[in-house]
Amino acid sequence: MYGLDTNVLVRFILRDDPIQAEQAKTAIAGAVAEGKSIAASLLTILETEWVLRSCAKLKKAEVITTFRMLLETRDLQIEREEVLEAALYYYESSKADFADCLMTSRYADLKCEAMFTFDRGASKLPGNLLLPLVKGI
């Protein structure tokens, strides 16, 4: 099995650097041809979302579609796929940012009772608890 760094996954998705995109494609295809699996960690997914949104300027719906396509890719193993699926549901159906959705989903997977947060948007996700902001403490 081979793991993907964020920069390799981003080049493979965006193809914004023709040389690196071809290298990523060749490495992935070569591994698959050898019968090896390709893996993407949740950290890689988190960083990829940031790059797609912040640098590539993809819209929320485009990011969601991209990640759903990755989930359907036969030769790609995403760490805790069900966590990403739940995070995408939260992301699509709320105003919370993707990182909060992914953390919420992962904490639920870890059987946490709740995620404490100071973020009002994140607090609206299921199972999250908004802590009061108290000045001077």
Image (spheres, helix red, strand yellow):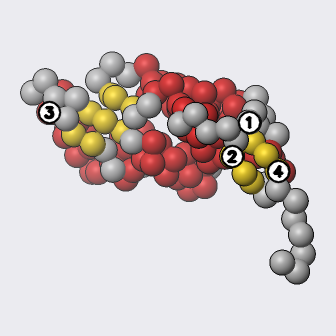
In the rendered structure, which amino acid carries the disc numbered 2?
Met
**137 lies above or below 107:** below
Say the numbered circle drawn on residue 30. Answer: 3
Residue at 9% across, 27% down? 34
Q: Marks 3 and 4, Cα distance to the nearest angstrom?
A: 47 Å
Residue at 13% across, 24% down? 35
In the rendered structure, which amino acid carries the disc numbered 1?
Gly
Percent across and percent down for residue 85 are 56, 26
**Which circle's residue, 3 or 1, is located before the other in the chain?**
3
Callout 4: helix, strand or loop? strand
Q: Nearer the viewer, residue 132 or 74?
A: 132
From the viewer's perspective, is 41 left or right of 122?
A: left
In the picture, residue 123 is in which quadrant?
Answer: top right
Percent across and percent down for residue 33 are 13, 25
Q: Which residue is denoted by mark 2 in the rendering?
A: 115
Q: Which residue is denoted by mark 1 in the rendering?
A: 127
Q: Nearer the viewer, residue 129 or 119?
A: 129
Please say whether residue 55 is visible from this viewpoint.
yes
Q: Marks 1 and 2, Cα distance to the nearest angstrom?
A: 7 Å
**Which circle's residue, 3 or 2, is located before the other in the chain?**
3
Give the foreground label among 3 and 4.
4
